Image: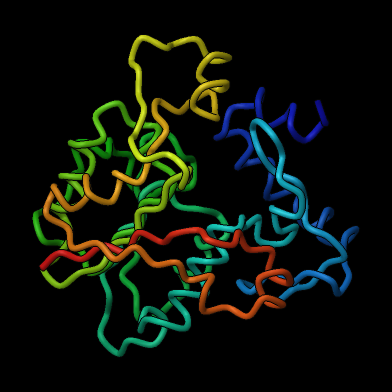
Amino acid sequence: MSIFKSILNTVPRPWLIKVSYWVRPIIALTLKGDKFTDPIDGKSFRKFLPYGYGKQRENALSPSTLSLERHRLMWLFLRDETTFFTSKKTLKTLHIAPEQCFLDIFRKQKNLEYITSDLESPIADVKADICDLPFDENSFDIVFCNHVLEHITNDTKAMQELYRVLKPGGMGIFQIPQDISREKTFEDDSITDEKERAKIFGQYDHVRVYGLDYFDKLRSIGFKVDEIDYTKKIAPEELERFCLMKGEILPVCYKE
């Protein structure tokens, strides 16, 4: 097992977040080059870092922002297909389990009223359970909740809360680890051993593997869901340069 993979699997995530603020400038400096580019900050490197709790993906983690493929894809979609960065209206935005690669940029955006929430993250503003959010109904124009629901035992309740706090006409992006070859979601509450969870669910703290029925479950909550393969709109050379995952689906959800 590589040193990086060993760290991922043994060091608690809150500690990793704290340490990363000190380590990433050093890593970014040592990997400086011009082969791959992080579109979030525009910086280029000779390679990205590998990442994964099980089988590691090469050139997945940006040395500068610590973005992964899914973060860079969402950034490009927001930048090129929405008014998220340009809206003259103030967008009240809730970010569940905020990712470091977005945090400082979103906080500095003058068109956002930006609130972050999580039960454990040391960088979240509001400590709260996603199944019992302390916000009024119809509060937010935008809600982000990425790679969270696979950790939540009662994901139905979590989805209902996301729907409740989103304003009519609002937009949410709720990314999950994807297995596009699986039709049905698999979960088994009896699997509690961390090694067994990692083997079956892909990560020690996951409680299910979502299938293609994930999108219909969101629809059953009330969301209008667009299943967007945004990689189809990105040139092949840019897919490679930005280190994106071809075929990844963005679940873009609306409350009508």
Nearest the viewer among 60 and 95 is: 60
Q: In the rendered view, does 4 fall on the left or right side of 194?
A: right
Q: Is residue 41 above or below residue 28?
A: below
Which of the 4 image quarters holds residue 114?
A: bottom left
Q: What residue is rendered at 17% in x and 45% in y? A: 161
Quarter of the picture holding the C terminus: bottom left
Q: Could you say where residue 194 lies in the image, as x and y percent from the top left?
A: 53, 15
Q: Could you say where residue 87 lies in the image, as x and y percent from the top left?
A: 32, 86
Q: What residue is rendered at 63% in x and 80% in y? A: 235
Q: What residue is rendered at 72% in x and 61% in y? A: 64
* Display colour scheme: rainbow
Q: Could you say where residue 29 lies in the image, as x and y percent from the top left?
A: 87, 62
Quarter of the picture holding the N terminus: top right
Q: What residue is rendered at 83% in x and 60% in y? A: 47
Nearest the viewer among 36 and 91 is: 36
Which of the 4 image quarters holds residue 140?
A: bottom left
Q: Is residue 206 above or below residue 32?
A: above
Q: Is residue 174 above or below residue 208?
A: below
Q: How many marks?
A: 0
Q: Could you say where residue 254 lies in the image, as x and y percent from the top left?
A: 20, 66
